[in-house]
Amino acid sequence: MTAEPVPPAGEQDGDGTVQCWCCGADDLPDRMVHLGNHPEVHLCLRCAHFVHQRASAIEDEGRSGPAVRARQILRAAREEVVRRGWHRNRFIGGRLRWLGKHLP
Ligand SMILES: [Zn+2]
């Protein structure tokens, strides 16, 4: 009995895919985001969008104004949707996920 070796995150698998360093999802290297000084690090598009949203939230922490407040309200609404699992609802989940992609 032999176990098939699993390549570490970031290394190419036999089918040419690489693993996301964040969530472990497999995809082709061209469909991943690579870090400037660490090109061996691969982020899938979902995780890259998440990192972008987190960076935007951190930037907003020291700011004020109506646009910042609007983004904070939208972030809170997104977190509530995810906490309640509405994004997985078979009736409204698809629309909520689409909306989440297009909001800041
Ligand atoms: Zn990922």
Image: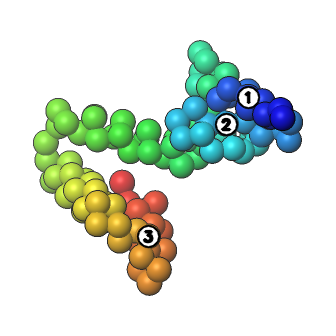
Front residue (pair 62, 20): 20
Q: Secondary structure at mark 1?
A: loop
Query: What label sits on residue 7 in the rendered view?
Result: 1
| Residue corresponding to mark 3 | 88
Q: Residues within 10 Å of mark 1 (few under 14, many from 20)?
A: few
Q: Secondary structure at mark 3?
A: helix
Q: Evaluate if marks 2 and 1 touch, with contact meaning CB atoms under 8 Å apart.
A: yes
Counting labels gives 3
- In the visual, does 91 lie left or right of 24? left
Answer whether residue 74 is visible to the viewer in this image.
no
Answer whether residue 5 is visible to the viewer in this image.
yes
| Residue corresponding to mark 2 | 19
| Among the two numbered marks 1 and 3 on one chain, the one whose residue lies closer to the N terminus | 1
Query: What label sits on residue 30 in the rendered view?
Result: none
Up-down: is 9 above or below 45? above
Q: Secondary structure at mark 2?
A: strand
Q: Which quadrant does the C terminus fall into? A: bottom left
Q: Residue at x 28, y 35 (%)?
A: 58
Front residue (pair 11, 66): 11
Amino acid carrying label 3: it is: Arg
Q: In which image quadrant can residue 21 be found?
A: top right
The location of residue 26, given as percent across then percent down, is: 69, 44
The location of residue 102, given as percent across then percent down, is: 44, 62
